[in-house]
Structures are given as C-alpha cells and as structure tokens.
Amino acid sequence: MNRRLLTLAVAGVPLALVGAVYAPVSASAQPADAAAQPVTAAAAAAGTPSAFTCSAFQLPAPAGAVVESVTASTVPAGTYQVPGTPPLGGFPIPDVPAHCEVTVTLTHPGANDHATVQVWLPQTGWNGRFQGVGGAAYAAGQIGNVATAVKQGYAAATTDAGVDTSGLNSSWALTANGKINTAALTDFASRSVHEMTLVGKEVVADVYTHAASYSYFNGCSTGGRQGYMEAQKYPTDYNGINADAPAINWNQFEVATLWPQVVMNQEHTYPTGCEFNAFNAAAVKACDKLDGVVDGLISDPNKCGFDPRRLVGTKVECDGKQVTITAADADVVRKIWDGPRDTAGRRLWYGLPVGASFDYLAASTTDASGVTSGSPFIVPAQWVANFVQKQPGFSSANLTYKQFDQIFQKARAEYDSVIGTSNPNLSAFRNAGGKLITWQGDADQLIPTAGTVDYRQRVDALMGGTKKVDDFYRVFLAPGVAHCGLQGGGVDDMAALTTWVEHGQAPSVLHATLPTATGQTVARDVCRYPMVSHYTGHGDPTSASSFRCVPASRY
C-alpha cells in the first residue's frame, strides 16, 4: 500500500523513531521483569510523537472483503466511558491517554454483513506492539479492553463482527426465513477477528511508518476461543496469544452447561442457592487439606473425592430457617458434578467443577403459587434455541434426558467445523514460532475446566507429548478461581507472554492473587499443567514462597 494514501499526519518527532520495545503490564498483570523494560528513558522519549492529526484515508481490504467506510478522529486524554450496559459496558476507564481512533467497516459481497473494526493508536509512548482484543459470550469484541491496552502502550484493535455488542443477544443467528445466518456466524466464529488483525496491522504500519515489532492477541472466554481459532486457522497472525478460560469445544460445552437444568427437571428437585453452597463448603472443607495446608483452596479438584451423600441429613441455615439436606439434593449435586451423560450412561462432556458456584447453571425460580422451575443460563439457552433448534422461543427449562441427548448430538455434528475450535493440530502455529498461554480457574462456573484440559491432552497426544508441547503452548490452572476471575489485576499473563515471545523465557508459573473460600486473597504461583501447587510444610500459607509445583501424582 502507498503510505501516502493514509493521511494520518503526525507532527513533531519523525515516526520512524517510534517503537522502543518493552514488556507492558496487561489489564491483569504485574510488572514485567527488568529484561523487558525500555533500553533507556532517552530512547523512549526520542520515539514519542508530539501529536496526531487524524483524517480520512484509503485502506486496502482483506481478501474477499470490501471496505465500506473509514473514519478517523483524535481523542484527548481522559476518562473513557465504555458504551452499553454491564457486564461489558456502562463503566468508566480513567486515565486513557490521547490517541487516534480509526474505524473501518467491512462487508463481503453477497453476504449483506457489516463488521466494524476499531483501531486505537496512542499518541505518545507506543510500545511498538499491536494487540488484538477478544470478546465475551455473543460479543465478538470489547472496546473497553482496547482502552485498557492503549493505557499500557499498545496500539490495539477489536471488532464487533457485525453482531450485537451486548454479549447476551444472539438474535442475529437466524435470517428472516428462519435459516442460520451463515455470514454472521462465519464472521463471529473466525473471519472477523482475522480481518481485524490484518486491518489493525495495516493501520499501525501506516500511522507509525513501520510495522509493529510484535503482535499479540488477548482474550478470555469467547476471547479465549478466538485466540485458539487464530492459532488453528490463521497461525501467522500473532507472535503470541493469551487465550484464557477459552470457550473452545463451543458446540459441545454450551449444550453441556444446560445439564444442571436437565437434572433438576428430571429429578423434580431444585436445591436452593443456600443448599448448593453447603455442598461446596463441605467439599472444600474435605479436600482443602490435600495440598498440605488448610488455606481455603482445593489445589487439585481431580483429587477431591467428596461424596455429596455425606451431607444427607445435615441441617443448614438458609434465610433464617433450618433446612435438612435430602438424598434427592445430594443426587442432583452428584449428577451435576459428574457431568452430562447420554441415555445409555456414556459420558458426553464434563460437569461443573467441584467448588464452582451453582448460581448460573443451576438457577431456579419459584412463582407466587410456590411452584419452582428451572432458569437456564442465557448463553447456552440461546445457543440451543437459536442455533441448534432454530426456534427463538424454545425453552431449555424442561428438557428430558432423552431430549438433551438428541440436542447434544445435533449440535456436535452441525457446528464442530464452524465454531467448535477443537482442532488439536497446532503445528503451523508452532512452526511459525508462535507462543500460546492459557489460564483457567479450577472453579470456573461457566466453562468446564476439564474441557480445556481435554484439549491440551489431545494436543499432547498429537504433537509429541507434554514436554514438546510445552515449548510453545502452556496451560495454567488456578485453584479457587471463577470464570475469567484473574482479569483486572490478578495475574501477570501478558507480561509472561511478551517475555516468552521476545526473550525466549518460557513461564514455569504465573504469579497471581487468588480468592479463597473464606473470602481472603492469597499470593500463589499458578502451576503449569500438569503440575499442581503443594505446601512445602513451613512458611506463611498466604505467601507464594510457601508452595511448590509438583506432579499431581505425588500426593
């Protein structure tokens, strides 16, 4: 592309000097090691442009796409109010530096789709890196995370994939005649993130007159799935991918997370949140000590053999009343933890992790007449209604075991190659020099952690075993952590990733702050799979130095 076609003028220091490389701190990061810091303060200052003047420009479209529009505007430093409503919008991000916002709209001939890409470029202090930002639930991107990345010195981009940005609305799934909107699904599943990456890199190269030194992807949940899709389908897009609590195996796990509703409906038993909490508290109490110390954390849930039936007959206080745990309550919990099975008793997928909250997947409501019924979590409920059944009014609250089995098999067959993101062949990503980090909470209440482990095990089996795979792909399981629960200051994931990519130093642990069952927070080094954390036998249990990573089989 002719660089003069992009008329984003920068006054002051020549742009060729921009881009001293250093390891920033992610939205959920601790400071990076000294080896990744700026070479000198003078060099960093010399590479800082004094101002942007943003105006319209021409941009080449990715192959198969058409650029519909391009706009650019200068935004002064200040607080950014993320648009929309919670959880993905409706909150402020303070101290966002002055930057240029470039908005590009793409379409694909015959598809009638319109995907928007936003690229933000810091006016000063660019760290020489590009960051692609992922989405959540049914939102393909999160503009708030772009603002956070810019605060850390990145030029950053995200896309809406042309679908609703609230994250909780998949009404775009069907066309007016009730057919799957294949263009929108393709955009959401894979195409838009790849095109966002190409557009973002092109804009960065034009604004700063040279390409980014390194490109990274950063996402959790749907963003985690997008990171894996990039590694599988577009292996040269990024040098490093941080893909956390990843929604891989989408076509299977989304249906699987309706299993608690099916169990409660079929067993005609709906434990209250208080009763469910009693089972979790009992499991933590029984299994906490297995890692050598009582600290409110289960370091290896696979070792926890707590039987819910042990609680039968126990009285718990719920809303000021004494409630007795029944055998039916215990059977519901046992089946939810065990996970979905078909009508012949064969495992379909994994269950809710022991210790994870039941609040989302096993919610229920009681009407004025005292009748209790299930209340399915909106994300899997919409997946089944809109995509699998293709009936927006379909309810998942009263599924039988047989109906659940049929829906699971239908979703598995129809969508694996589209959005499943389950391909374990990462050889092209490895051969391109890419590095992939994933962390996930052992108490993830929305995406079964065992599904991520299953994927990693399949990669190991295909690509030479754990040791060889660790050369480019590492998984870290965080005790006691809920879905995407280390975001916002809890872990040094991006710092670890940039150090690995740029200095060849692979992380053996991730430094994190973990919540315990007692409401406290403790410092821990989150071990890489298949290692687990074990108390050394001495020292402060709230200190990371009092623990070491050992193979799970050693205790």
Image: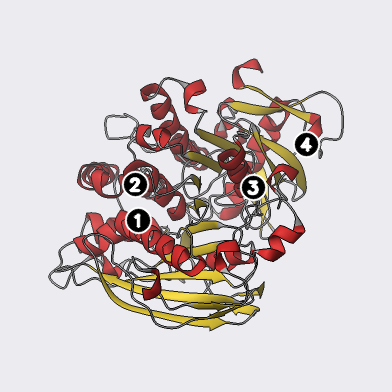
* SS at badge 4: helix
- Badge 3 marks a residue whose secondary structure is helix
> What residue is disc 2 on?
234
- Give me the residue at 81% from left, 40% from top: 542
Q: Is residue 29 above or below residue 99?
A: above
- Quadrant of the drawing holding the N terminus: bottom left
Residue nearest the viewer, comparing 361 with 140: 140
Please name the residue that numbered disc 1 is placed on.
Answer: 194
Disc 3 residue type?
A: Ala
Q: Which of marks 4 and 2 is nearer the N terminus?
A: 2
Residue drawn at x 21%, y 56% is 389
Work out whether mark 2 precedes mark 1 in sequence or the reverse, and give the earlier one.
1
Q: Tags 3 and 4 in contact by the CB under 8 Å rule?
A: no
Evaluate if marks 3 and 1 touch, with contact meaning CB atoms under 8 Å apart: no
Residue 376 in picture, x, y percent from top left = 40, 58
Q: Which mark is residue 544?
A: 4
Q: Which residue lies furthest to the top in this view?
A: 554
How much space separates mark 3 and mark 4, taking CA atoms? Answer: 18 Å
**Would residue 551 appear left or right of 331 to someone viewing this image?**
right
In primary-sequence order, the first of circles 2 and 3 is 2
What whole-number distance in Å separates the C-alpha atoms at marks 4 and 2? 37 Å
- Badge 1, how many Cα within 10 Å: few under 14, some, many 20+? many
Point 56% across, 26% down: residue: 530
Hey, what amino acid is under mark 2? Answer: Tyr
Residue 298: percent from left, percent from top: 66, 34
What residue is pinned by disc 3?
Answer: 495
Q: Which of 483 and 43 is in front in this view?
A: 43
Identify the amino acid type marked 1. His
Picture quadrant of residue 465: top left
Contact flag, marks 2 and 1 (Cβ < 8 Å): yes
